Image (cartoon, rainbow, N blue to C red):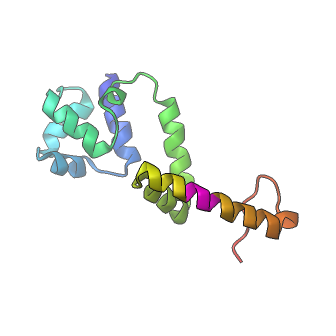
Amino acid sequence: MQFSNNLKQIRLSRLMSQQDVADKLHITRGAYSAYECGNRRPDVDILYQIATVLDVRIDFLFNTDCRRYNSTIEYYTSLCDEERELIDIYDGLTSFSKGRLLEHARCIKADDEEAFGALKIVGRKPRNG
């Protein structure tokens, strides 16, 4: 049952319907629903496709402890659009480009701290203004 519960939870965290996932897998919604209900187990090929569509490792679909994953999803969904966009851009970069981006980000942060350090309140985001 853990697989079917995880499958549903991950799908919902991706804001996808059963039909969305089924379409990407080229199966019927009923076939996909059977996986989430625990009435049917996907074969290895479909399992790989499910993991790809939901952007998780296959072993995670069978994980018995999703608490860490859930807290990550809750954090991600609490971010504003610009913050999520930055994460998505970062994820798509090469390792070399990630290093360059981090160097630039550190410089920008240092400039902000120098310019606005006196106004900074610990634990609070700066207001847009």
Answer with left or right where residue 54 lies relative to residue 107.
left
Residue depicted at 70% across the width and 61% down the height = 109
Magenta segment's dominant SS is helix
Q: Please, is residue 42 above or below residue 101 in the view?
A: above
Answer with left or right where residue 13 lies relative to residue 28.
right
Q: Residue 58, position in %: x, y?
A: 29, 30
Residue depicted at 39% across the width and 24% down the height = 63
Q: Residue 38, position in %: x, y?
A: 24, 26
Residue depicted at 37% across the width and 40% down the height = 10
Decide whether residue 26 is among the magenta residues: no
Q: Please, is residue 57 above or below residue 79 in the view?
A: above
Q: Please, is residue 100 above or below residue 116 in the view?
A: above
* Residue 53, image quadrant: top left
Q: Residue furthest bottom?
A: 129
The residue stretch that appears in magenta: 101-105
* Residue 33, image quadrant: top left
Answer with left or right where residue 110 lies relative to residue 80.
right
Q: Residue 27, position in %: x, y?
A: 11, 44
Q: Residue 66, position in %: x, y?
A: 46, 29
Residue depicted at 49% across the width and 44% down the height = 73
Answer with left or right where residue 29 lies relative to residue 10.
left
* Residue 93, image quadrant: bottom left
Query: What quarter of the picture does the C terminus occupy?
Result: bottom right
Q: Please, is residue 95 above or below residue 37 in the view?
A: below
Query: What quarter of the picture does the N terminus occupy?
Result: top left
Q: Which residue lies furthest to the left in this view?
A: 27
Residue 80 vs residue 40, the one in the foreground:
80
Q: Which residue lies furthest to the right in this view?
A: 118
